[in-house]
Image (cartoon, rainbow, N blue to C red):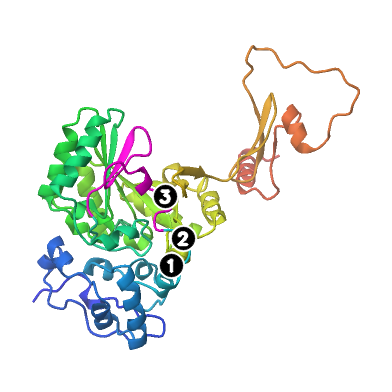
Amino acid sequence: METHPGDDAVPLRRPKGGAAPVGLPWPHATREQWNDYRWQLSNRITSVEDLAGLCGISDEEARLLSRVSDLYRMGITPYYFSLMRFDDADDPIARQAIPCAEEYFGVEGGEDDPLEEEKDMPVPGLTHRYPDRCLLVVTNFCSMYCRHCTRKRIWTLGEAAKTEFELSKMFAYVKRHEEIRDVIVSGGDPLTLPSGRLEYILKNLRKIPHVEIIRIGTRVPVVLPMRVDDELCAVLEKYGPIWLNTQFNHPREVTDEAKAACDRLLRAGVPVNNQTVLLKGVNDHPEIIRKLNTELLKAKVRPYYLFQCDMVRGLEHFRTRLTKGIEIMEALRGHTSGLAVPSYVVDVPGGGGKIPLMPTYILSMGEERTVLRNYEGIIVSYEEARDDGRPSARPETTMPAPRNDVYRLLTGELRSLTPAGNERMARRKRRCESASPTT
Ligand code: SF4
């Protein structure tokens, strides 16, 4: 019997202090089954008993994880499970999928809905915050329940999708509000809906003349790439323009299967953007994000956002300081292709929306010049445009001008300051020297 890809070395996670991995998961799955998203969905790991059977966790750990999964449900596709490495107790893939004690013991911190999506919800499931955009939560179901999910609160509502009646109220609201031109279809994961139900949603949105853009938020390319089949692509192509935002968080998620799924979406005319969540213990290092974004670009996926992890109850162990995000952005901007540099944003508590953060590149500003620094630390005097072609008036004074270098940059006396040891300048010098004739 044919077995699923990777059977030779099916990775099994060895939890901290847990026993050795046992058995091979799904040994009887055929390749055809493995590549069928319905098989993946019906073989999800949804209980601690399933997990214990696959990972050989201790009874004590199983009891603790049961308490966590009673609070926050668990669901892991066999495909995503197969990406885990069980020789690493801190595996970044497992960390996103397997419940951990901190979720349970961290419920005192954070809020269920820090972004206050529910307070801007005129119709159940529809958040209207920004004037020209709205968000539709069309299902509570996800193929995988990411441990760091911002909408964990909706998991307690069961795995139901919105009914036609509930959806009709959302469509009616969008229709009444002509200022809405961009609708984000999200969840849960909307691409876990049957294709017919997804088509019903897209068709009804497309009937509304002022809806110009439809965006879909989904983790399907990452956790269930086989869902991106011909049937789904045909639906998406039919109701375009549709933009798809997904969430790759680690370079190891950019597998051949995931890349093929993104390629199928692109061929169906659906641009794929990525919204990484910055997660402690998963991707909180500049090199991981740089590698992730490079891999994504190779798959023609645009790194769009780097999201600060929200202050959701039970997620404190995933949160990093803002300084970590700034450090990562500092390591990206100028050091890699601009296409690989996302916007780092924090969605502020209280419903204030997304605020972009970046390292500071403006050191000082004067009427005629601004002092900037580049990614290498070179400080440059940038001459401003003159409004009327005449320089600003200078008062006559006998006071001595300040003599520090920033002031000299502001007055134009200095053009730039280059730190000692700058590699680019050294390269230039070497090139000049090798080009100049020897005497
Ligand atoms: S797929 Fe999206 S909505 Fe579902 S659990 Fe993961 S992050 Fe949350």
Residue type highlighted by circle 1: Val
Callouts 1 and 2 close, C-beta under 8 Å:
yes
Residue 241's label in the rendered image is none
Residue 350: x %, y % from top left: 46, 47
Residue 235 seen in the current view: no
Q: Viewed as shown, does residue 397 lie left or right of 322?
A: right
Disc 2 designates what residue? 110
Q: Residues within 10 Å of mark 2 (few under 14, many from 20)?
A: some
Report the front residue among 312 and 18. Answer: 312
Q: Is residue 276 above or below residue 167?
A: below
Disc 3 designates what residue? 115
Tell me the magenta residue range: 112-139
Q: Is mark 2 within 8 Å of ligand 1?
A: no
Q: Viewed as shown, does residue 125 lie left or right of 336?
A: left
Assign a secondary structure to mark 1: loop
Residue at image point 44% right, 45% down: 351
Of the numbered discs 3 and 2, the one sitting upstream in the chain is: 2
Where in the image, quadrant-wise, is ligand 1 located?
Answer: bottom left
Q: Considering the whole magenta stretch, tell me its main secondary structure.
A: loop
Disc 1 designates what residue? 107
Report the front residue among 266 and 187. Answer: 187
CA gap, disc 3 and disc 2:
11 Å
Residue farthest right in this picture: 398
Residue type highlighted by circle 2: Gly
